[in-house]
Image: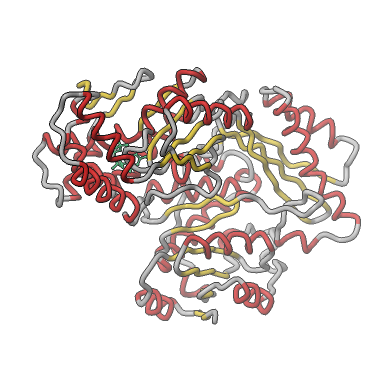
Amino acid sequence: MTRIFRRVAALRCWRRSLVGDVGFVPTMGALHRGHGSLMERARRENRYVIVSIFVNPMQFGPQEDFHRYPRTWEADVQLCQSLGVDAIFAPLPAEVVPSFRVVPPPEMVQVLCGPHRPGHFEGVCTIVLQLLNIVQPDRVYLGQKDGQQVAIVARMVEEFHLPVQVVRCPTVREASGLALSSRNRYLQGEEQRVATLLYQALALAVKEFEGGERSVGNLIKSMENFLRPYPQLRLQYIECVDLETLTPLDVIMDGMTAMLAIAGYVGNTRLIDNVLLQKRRPIVAIDGPAGAGKSTVAKLVAEKLGLVYLDTGAMYRAITWSVLQAGIDLEDKSAIVELASNLNLRVTSDAQIFVNGENVTQVIRQQAVTAAVSTVAAIPEVRAILVKEQQALGKAGGVVMEGRDIGTHVFPQAEVKIFLTASVAERARRRQRDLQQRQLEVPDLAEIQKSIEERDYKDMHRPISPLRQAEDAIRIDTDGMTIEEVVDKIISLWQERL
Ligand code: DC
C-alpha cells in the first residue's frame, strides 16, 4: 500500500520509523514512463521509495505554464502503487515554499535553458533542497532529460555536503525517439510529429560524432541544416557543454563527456532534449576475491594490450599503511578519514605508488597492512575519496583496473568486465607457494585458508560496495588454469568485444 502524506510533520514521523536505505524521486506529477523508470531504479536500489508530487510554483516564470501544467493525481497515485512506491509526499505550498532562495552559480545558469528561463533553476534548487531536507533520502533519482537540472542539483549536493547520492538516469523515449515529458500532453495532431525533429537532429549529430567529427561548431551546423526546412520547430538553442560543469565546449576531446542539448517551441509547447557524446579508449575491469591472481593477470593483460595497469587495492593499502604509520587505532574511523582526506596519493603508469611524495610500493605489501586493509576499505568516506580518484585516473580509458568494485561501482560501463576467482583451497595453496618462493615464513595451509576466508567475509559483507560479481561480468574460475591460460582468455574476450 502506498501511503500518502501532505504534511511535513507526518512525513517526518513516518520517515523516522524507517530502517534501511531510502530512495527519493522528486516530481511535479503528470507521471509517465520516464518517471516510472526512476521509480523502478529506486525500487531496485533501496529498501524504501518515496515519490514527491509537487508542482513547484517557484520554477515557473510569470509567462510560463504553471496554471495549465497537467495535473493527473489519480493516475499518478495508481502508477506509484503499481511500482511499489512506499509513500507519496504531496506537500502544501504554504508549508514548503520558503522565502529564502538558493542561487545557483552564474556559470551554470548562463548556458542552455538558463537565459531563457530566468529564475527557473533558483526555484528548482530552493525546492529540491527543501525536499531533500524533509525526506532525508540516501539516494535521489533524477532524469537525464533535464540534464542541466541534474548537473546543478549534483553541484548543490556537493557544495552543501548534503548526505545524499545523486543518481542520473537515462532518458526514456517513445519509439519515434521523442523524449517522454509531461509537456508532451500539450502536443496536438501534427505537432507530435514535429516534436520528433528534436531527437532526429540529435541522432544525426551522434552519427557524425561516431564517424569521428569532434568539432562542436560542425555538429551544430549539421543539426541546423537538417532543421532548416521545418519552420514549425522554432529553435531556441543548440549547445554543447561538459556534462558536469556545464562549461561550453568547442571540441569534444577523448575522455570528456559532452552533453549536446537542444530546445525549441512546437506551437506553444517548449520542448528540450539532449544526448551524451563521449569517446574514450576501452576499460578492462578485473574484480574478484583476495588471492585469485588479479594483479598478476591484470599486469600481463595490460602489457599485451598496451594499456595502463592500475591496482586499486594498492591505493587502499597505501592509506592503511599511512594509518598504521600514524599509530591511529583501527577503531577510530573518523581519525582514519581525517588522515585519508589529507593524504596526497599518486599512482604512476608503471604501477608505483607514492604517499606524500614517498614511494610506498613495497612497504604496502607487509602483513600488517594486509591484515588491516579490509577494515579501512570498508569505511564509506575512504571509498568515496578513492573511487573519485580512480574514476579520474581511468577517465580517458586505456586502462586495466583491478580491485573489488571496479565493474560494479568505479566503472560499471567498462567494456570488458571480468570476475576472477578460485576456490579458497586453491588460493591458499598459491599463497603458500608464493611465500615459500619469497623465502618468507610460511604458516600452515589451514591457517592461510582461515585468513583468506576472513578477508572474503569482510570484503563481501561490508555495507558499502561489497565484493560481488557485476551482472554483466564474465566469471573466470581459475582452479586448474595456468596464468597464461587466464591471460589468453581475457585477451580473446577483449578481441570479441571490440
Ligand atoms: O587486492 P588487494 O589485496 O591489494 O586489496 C586490498 C584491500 O583493498 C582488500 O581487502 C579489498 C580492498 N579493495 C577494495 O575494497 N576495493 C578495491 N577496488 C580494491 C581493493
**170 or 286, which is in the foreground?**
286
Q: Position of 490 compared to 439: left or right? A: right
Q: Position of residue 135 (x, y in %)?
A: 43, 68
Q: Residue at x 42, y 50 (%)?
A: 468
Q: Farthest left residue?
A: 327
Q: Position of residue 24 (x, y in %)?
A: 49, 64
**119 or 140, which is in the foreground?**
140
Q: Position of residue 341 (x, y in %)?
A: 25, 39
Q: Position of 479 compared to 305: left or right? A: left
Q: Is residue 215 above or below residue 94?
A: above
Q: Is residue 13 above or below residue 114?
A: below
Name the image quarter holding the C terminus.
top right
Q: Residue at x 63, y 62 (%)?
A: 35
Q: Position of 139 compared to 194: left or right? A: left
Q: Position of residue 115 (x, y in %)?
A: 62, 43
Total numbered labels placed on residues in the image: 0
Q: Residue at x 31, y 54 (%)?
A: 462
Q: Position of 7 compared to 60: left or right? A: left
Q: Is residue 363 among what the camera can see?
A: yes
User: In which quarter of the view is residue 385 placed?
Assistant: top left
Name the image quarter holding the N terminus.
bottom right
Instruction: Report the image quarter containing ligand 1.
Output: top left
Q: How is the image coloured?
A: secondary structure
Q: Residue at x 30, y 34 (%)?
A: 430
Q: Farthest front residue?
A: 480
**173 or 216, which is in the foreground?**
173
Q: Is residue 338 among what the camera can see?
A: no
**91 or 275, which is in the foreground?**
275
